[in-house]
């Protein structure tokens, strides 16, 4: 039997503060961790739910340089954006902290100094990649190249995201700097290494104690331990300015490795949350640490972070690491850089008040054992066929009939239960136990299916009993049926709380029973005769095909815009290295693009949008409006009369209440960052085809 700890510290991977949250992040760790924590709270177990923004690393510096702002301004923007979106989605963190805080600097430096004073680290002078054009050493994530194992061309210097292999920058074939595109040079520098090779026996003993972890998690850990090269020393410092400074006088200009720094953010946040009482959440033997992560973070949470905790001493090691696989989108890999994503903050705007619809669709397709796919068609089907037709339909029918027949006053249960009544009551207990079993095993898809099964039982019970017909011939039996059906609705208001908290709260409000008492589900009878229930409230609405098509068009527009921007960002300066070619496409993929020469007839600034100009252009076929993000580079007067190249058959997209009917192609000068128009070398009539 699984051990029930006195308390559980649940962490969700710290999202990196260089972009918004998308549905892949939700499916990877934030939704399953929230479901699990809500369940533990319902069982009255002591639990702390810890998260925060990961705000250090070279990617932040790169973004800041590109935007002409400070790294702190970058992380401030995304810290608030991510935290607000997750809270609005119902992710019920006890604290959402950040790693750029003074408190975290204190915690991380103290950890490093503890290991340094114990002689754990090895100071090594090594040859490290240096960008001769950017004049700085390159962190792992600022070097890309060909993976030596799967031959992915854009593998990072610390990991290949395609095959999951952990790498060192020197492993890459044809390495190149992401800062300038230059081929990096090897130069000497000193850093402090965690000797994972020496610590391997300890790490192996720890991992092998957890052979009951998910096969993907345990298997990945074993593959690192059992590989021919075994574990290798890993540098815990980097030649960086942005980050937690290494607390050594001889380490000027160096910061802690982000994967030393970031997991310690869990401990910082716990200290901020509990003050002097924080230690029991990390050090007490009767505490379990549970890390919810995506599979790309397994090595850091199962090998590197435990090794750091072991060498420090006094800390509990992670008891469970229920990492999920990756979620794809419409058959393609989610990609922040390619803008192939459904962004959470945009979903909350496009579908206000419909958090549970997305929670349901994501939970039903969580990539628990293998990569899975989210599509808008599946989202629509699950909302309409399951939430609306099954759950919403059952609850609504029961509530409407209660008010129609009894003015909202609950009738008494039958003195002697008929078989179908007994089966319905038994289903409440049976499905509750099934949900508990699945959640204790971190099988969230199964748990949701078991909870929804109770709504199916309720629908079948109503369909079989037909109280709307029975009321004409047997009022007594009709009252008994409605009493039983209402008990099922009340049970759903508790059973669905971990998965659909907003809808479950509406059900409990309708039941006039706002408190959540999970253990009452095992009793069967949740409401007594004479209890007054509230007015019916519609739980869900059907999703229309037009809404789904709008999302697909939005997705394609963003992807095409990103691809066009990437393709049109021609390197103008001859001193600069040419970026490598992108993946090959077929003529059939290119042929549908309708590129036309057009003339700008008018241009005005879009109110309250610093980057947008509203252009009126003559395409030779029609006169149309196109919004272009060039206001920081050109005044309206500078563009009127210009000939430009337009992607004319791009689906319209509404921005700031204005419909944009195409896209202007631009090129970016890498030395100045200024945009330039892609235009004909000689005057051409509007409508001329570019091919």
Image: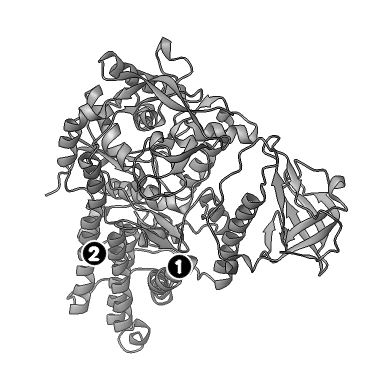
**Which residue is denoted by mark 2 in the rendering?**
431
Q: Residue furthest left?
A: 1
The total of numbered circles placed on residues is 2
Q: Nearer the viewer, residue 142 or 171?
A: 171
For residue 630, side relative to residue 77 (left or right):
right
Give the structural element (helix, strand or loop) at label 2: helix
Q: Is residue 68 above or below residue 373?
A: above
**x, y percent for residue 44:** 25, 45
For residue 352, side relative to residue 149 (left or right):
right
Q: Is residue 283 visible?
A: no
Query: Of the residues tagged 1 and 2, which is closer to the observer?
Result: 2
Q: Residue furthest top?
A: 249
Q: Quadrant of the C terminus?
A: bottom right
Q: Nearer the viewer, residue 244 or 152?
A: 152
Give the structural element (helix, strand or loop) at label 1: loop
**x, y percent for residue 189:** 43, 20
Quadrant in which residue 584 is drawn:
bottom right
Mark sitting earlier along the chain (1/2): 2
Q: Is residue 243 above or below residue 680?
A: above
Q: Nearer the viewer, residue 339 or 680?
A: 680
**Which residue is denoted by mark 1 in the rendering?**
536
Q: Residue furthest bottom?
A: 473
């Amino acid at each position: 039997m699984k051990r029930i700890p006195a308390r559980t510290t649940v962490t969700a991977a710290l999202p990196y503060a260089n972009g918004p949250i998308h549905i892949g992040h939700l499916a990877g760790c934030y939704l399953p961790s929230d479901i699990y924590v809500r369940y533990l709270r319902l069982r009255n177990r002591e639990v702390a739910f810890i998260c925060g923004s990961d705000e250090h690393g070279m990617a932040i510096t790169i973004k800041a340089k590109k935007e002409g702002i400070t790294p702190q301004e970058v992380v401030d923007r995304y810290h608030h954006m991510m935290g607000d979106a997750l809270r609005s989605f119902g992710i019920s963190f006890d604290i959402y902290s950040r790693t750029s805080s003074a408190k975290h600097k204190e915690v991380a430096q103290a950890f490093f100094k503890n290991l340094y004073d114990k002689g754990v680290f090895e100071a090594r002078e090594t040859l490290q990649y240096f960008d001769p054009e950017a004049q700085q050493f390159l962190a792992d994530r600022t070097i890309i190249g060909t993976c030596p194992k799967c031959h992915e061309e854009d593998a990072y210097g610390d990991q290949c995201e395609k095959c999951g292999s952990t790498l060192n920058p020197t492993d890459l074939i044809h390495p190149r700097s992401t800062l300038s595109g230059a081929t990096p040079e090897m130069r000497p520098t000193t850093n402090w290494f965690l000797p994972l090779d020496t610590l391997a026996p300890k790490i192996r003993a720890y991992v092998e104690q957890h052979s009951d972890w998910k096969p993907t998690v345990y298997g990945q850990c074993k593959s690192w331990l059992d590989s021919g090269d075994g574990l290798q020393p890993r540098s815990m410092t980097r030649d960086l300015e942005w980050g937690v400074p290494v607390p050594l006088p001889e380490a000027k200009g160096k910061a802690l490795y982000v994967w030393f720094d970031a997991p310690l953010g869990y401990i910082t946040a716990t200290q901020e949350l509990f003050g002097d009482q924080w230690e029991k959440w990390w050090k007490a033997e009767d505490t379990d640490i549970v890390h919810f992560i995506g599979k790309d973070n397994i090595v850091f949470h199962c090998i590197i972070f435990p090794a750091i905790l072991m060498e420090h001493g006094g800390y509990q090691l992670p008891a469970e690491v229920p990492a999920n696989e990756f979620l794809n989108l419409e058959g393609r890999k989610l990609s922040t850089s390619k803008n192939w994503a459904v962004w959470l903050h945009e979903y909350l705007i496009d579908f206000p008040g419909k958090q549970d619809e997305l929670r349901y669709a994501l939970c039903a397709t969580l990539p628990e054992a293998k990569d899975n796919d989210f599509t808008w068609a599946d989202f629509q089907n699950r909302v309409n066929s399951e939430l609306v037709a099954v759950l919403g339909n059952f609850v609504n029918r029961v509530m409407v009939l209660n008010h129609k027949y009894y003015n909202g006053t609950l009738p008494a249960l039958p003195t002697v239960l008929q078989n179908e009544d007994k089966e319905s009551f038994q289903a409440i207990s049976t499905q509750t136990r099934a949900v508990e079993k699945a959640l204790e095993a971190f099988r969230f898809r199964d748990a949701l299916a078991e909870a929804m099964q109770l709504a199916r039982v309720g629908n079948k019970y109503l369909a079989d009993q037909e109280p709307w017909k029975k009321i004409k011939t047997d009022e007594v039996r009709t009252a008994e049926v409605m009493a039983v059906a209402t008990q099922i609705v009340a049970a759903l208001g508790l059973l669905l709380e971990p998965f659909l908290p907003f809808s479950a709260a509406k059900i409990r409000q309708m039941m006039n029973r706002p408190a959540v008492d999970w253990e009452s589900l095992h009793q069967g009878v949740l409401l007594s005769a004479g209890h007054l229930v509230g007015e019916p409230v519609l739980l869900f609405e059907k999703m229309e095909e037009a809404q789904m098509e709008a999302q697909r068009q939005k997705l394609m527009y963003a992807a095409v815009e990103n691809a066009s921007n990437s393709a049109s960002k021609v390197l103008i300066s001859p001193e600069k290295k040419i970026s490598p070619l992108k993946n090959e496409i077929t003529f059939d993929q290119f042929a549908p693009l309708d590129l036309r020469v057009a003339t700008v007839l008018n241009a005005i600034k879009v109110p309250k949008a610093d980057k947008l100009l509203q252009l009126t252009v003559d395409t030779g076929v029609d006169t149309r409006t196109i919004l272009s993000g060039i206001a920081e580079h050109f005044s309206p007067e500078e563009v009127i009369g210009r000939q430009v190249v337009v992607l004319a058959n791009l689906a319209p997209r509404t921005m700031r209440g204005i419909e944009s009917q195409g896209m202007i192609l631009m090129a970016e000068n890498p030395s100045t960052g200024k945009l330039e128009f892609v235009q004909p070398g000689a005057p051409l009539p509007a409508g001329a085809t570019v091919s």
